[in-house]
Amino acid sequence: MKTFDLVVFDWDGTLMDSAAAIVHAISAASLDLGLAPPGEARARHVIGLGLNEALRYIAPELPPEHYPEMAKRYRQRYFACQHELTLFAGVEEMLAQLAERGFQLAVATGKSRRGLDEALDHFNLRACFQATRCADQCLSKPHPQMLLELMRERGVAPERALMIGDTTHDLEMAKNANVAAIAVCYGAHPPSVLRAAAPLACVDSVAELHSWLETNAQSVKSTAS
């Protein structure tokens, strides 16, 4: 078993089943500005990035002065439906048991601070996490700033941290921070692409992720006991 002091989760596509809603909001915002909506694969690719980075990838032909309007339209479309979204089955039980086993839990997400705070409050999960970082606080994934700040805040060395996410942006961020990673294959990016990044494990469900963590990961608390 590996010992981890800190387990960091991505949010969209990892804990919350929101990839389809993000794709819809991106497509709707594109149409609002008279742009052809990106295909689903292209829209899914930017999930996890900061919004500005995502828009530049999705609409490179859009004059830069119009990005704020597209960002506004995206937020309007997404926030209009976000409270209809759900956590993946088993997430709450997994987080509760990880906390009981002594792991510190954190979030590193491409969401805005407002978006993450609203989601945490909606699902009553704010108390589950000791620290969080969002894309409007840090450089966008795959830059390691989010993980570096979380580790510094919690006093954790890279070899004792674990990143869990559903995109190559998460896995690359972990690599850039010298942190181990697990890929979840039920979110935004294709399993084949995630496996090619050679994470510690690739899992197909929250249940499988929970099982992997129970079997392969221990905390300092569980080691001491």
Image: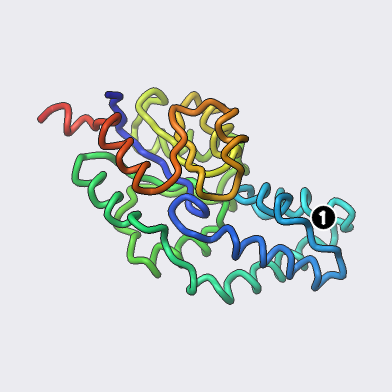
> Which image quadrant for residue 23?
bottom right
**Which quadrant is the C terminus positioned in?**
top left
Residue at (34% x, 32% y) in the render: 155
- Residue 209: percent from left, percent from top: 37, 42
- Residue 35: percent from left, percent from top: 86, 65
Given residues 24 and 142, the one toward you in this image is 24
- Residue 3: percent from left, percent from top: 28, 26
Given residues 162 and 199, the one toward you in this image is 199
Residue to which mark 1 is pinned: 59
> Which image quadrant for residue 111?
bottom right
For residue 139, side relative to residue 206 (left or right): right
Q: Which amino acid does the dot numbered 1 rest on? A: Ala
Residue at (47% x, 38% y) in the render: 149
**Which quadrant is the N terminus positioned in?**
top left
Relative vertical location of residue 208 with respect to residue 80 in this rendering, above or below: above
- Residue 147: percent from left, percent from top: 48, 36
For residue 166, side relative to residue 26 (left or right): left
Relative vertical location of residue 96 with respect to residue 35 in this rendering, above or below: above
Residue furthest bottom in the image: 80
Label 1 CA crowd tier, 10 Å (few <14, some 14–19, many 20+): some
What SS does tag 1 mark? loop
Residue at (62% x, 51% y) in the render: 47
